[in-house]
Amino acid sequence: MCIIIAKNKVGRLPSETELMNSFENNNDGAGFMYVDNGKVVIDKGYMNYEGFIKHYRTLLDKYNNFKNKSLVIHCRIGTSGKNNKGNTHPYPITDKVKLLRTRHLSRESIGIAHNGIIHGYGTATGLNDTQEYISKFLYPLYFHYRDFYKNKDMLYQMEQATNSKFAILDKTDDIYLVGNFIEDKGLYFSNNTYKDYGGYFKYDSKYYDDYYDDYYRDEENNWFNKLKQREEEQEETKKLSYTENEYDDFHLYKLESNWLVDMYGNGNYEKVGSRDYYYDWGTLELLEKINGDYKLVGNNPIVCDENGEEIF
């Protein structure tokens, strides 16, 4: 379910104990969001605690302990989409898949982090639920109404429709929270997993606020079971070839010639070069386009840019 930590301009910083608890209880990757030179910076893809806390300390040194400056931190538990660097939060509000998965962005006007499960999203396109919700719903809203996040009624409707919590940071360094956050000595948390309770999944109702009652725990279990069932069904019906007309182009992402690809995720990388490779968001496969047809060449590939930074 993840956790969001939101420090506004006058709030305190989280302690390293709070950060360690947050990461260990939500350990599928973490990221940061802050403003630099009038632009929102999205800085994510920290997959282990050592790298996460090291970078946090670097940011504190660089930005004078975020004095009079906002900071949003997100630690993820993956419920849809692969657990990799590109699927960590926060995200820009965009419909571009590459930008949703880019680890470092520093020219944004607005960014968002999510805590929860958005049912009905992240099952058809291969994107995780947050990415698909942003691309299909929030981006069109933002495109037509740039200040939607300043409208309390819109934020309330967003909360009701998704049953989720969000932190939105804009270039003015203001944070807008959606949902019921816990205020702890001037710092805001989206749930109790920052506390030292010996693990998020230890069952004791006193450890959780109303957001994490038995109903939502059952919902999480149902969600994981549905994902497992879907994966099994895909494995049984998997095709080795697709024609261009049979496939939705939204699912396909063409790889750049200077990128590196590990076809089977086994550590053997090769440069894309002149190969006409596509990443299939629907089935998480690597396809090669040959004479108008898509041929399967790898399952669960790992794709990196020319610097070795993981993209898919």
Image (tube, rainbow, N blue to C red):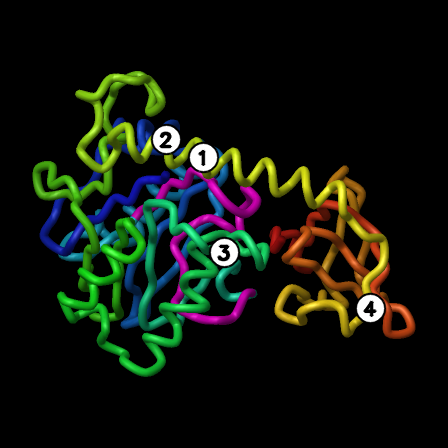
Mark 4, secondary structure of its residue = strand
Mark 2, secondary structure of its residue = helix
- Rounded to the nearest angstrom, the CA distance separating label 1 from label 4 is 34 Å
Q: Main secondary structure of the magenta part?
A: loop
Q: Which quarter of the figure has residue 124?
A: bottom right
Q: Is residue 120 left or right of residue 5?
A: right
Q: Which residue is mark 1?
A: 222
Label 1 with label 2: CB-CB less than 8 Å: yes
Q: Which residue is mark 4?
A: 243
Instruction: Give the label, 1 or 3, closer to the camera.
Output: 1
**Residue 218, numbered circle:** 2
Label 3 with label 2: CB-CB less than 8 Å: no
Q: Is residue 103 left or right of residue 8?
A: right
Q: Which residue is mark 3?
A: 103
Q: Position of residue 132 (x, y in %)?
A: 47, 61
N-term-proximal mark, 1 vs 4: 1
Q: Residue at x 31, y 27 (%)?
A: 21
Q: Residue at x 27, y 79 (%)?
A: 146
Instruction: Give the label, 3 or 4, closer to the camera.
Output: 4
* Three-letter code, disc 3: Arg
In magenta, the rendered stretch is 73-97
- Rounded to the nearest angstrom, the CA distance separating label 3 from label 2 is 32 Å
Relative vertical location of residue 192 with respect to residue 183 in this rendering, above or below: above
Q: Residue at x 85, y 66 (%)?
A: 275
N-term-proximal mark, 3 vs 2: 3
The question of residue 294 being in magenta is answered with no
- Rounded to the nearest angstrom, the CA distance separating label 1 from label 3 is 30 Å
Residue in front for this viewpoint, 167 or 21: 167
N-term-proximal mark, 2 vs 4: 2
Q: Is residue 133 left or right of residue 261?
A: left
Q: Position of residue 5 (x, y in %)?
A: 25, 44
Q: Position of residue 206 (x, y in %)?
A: 17, 21
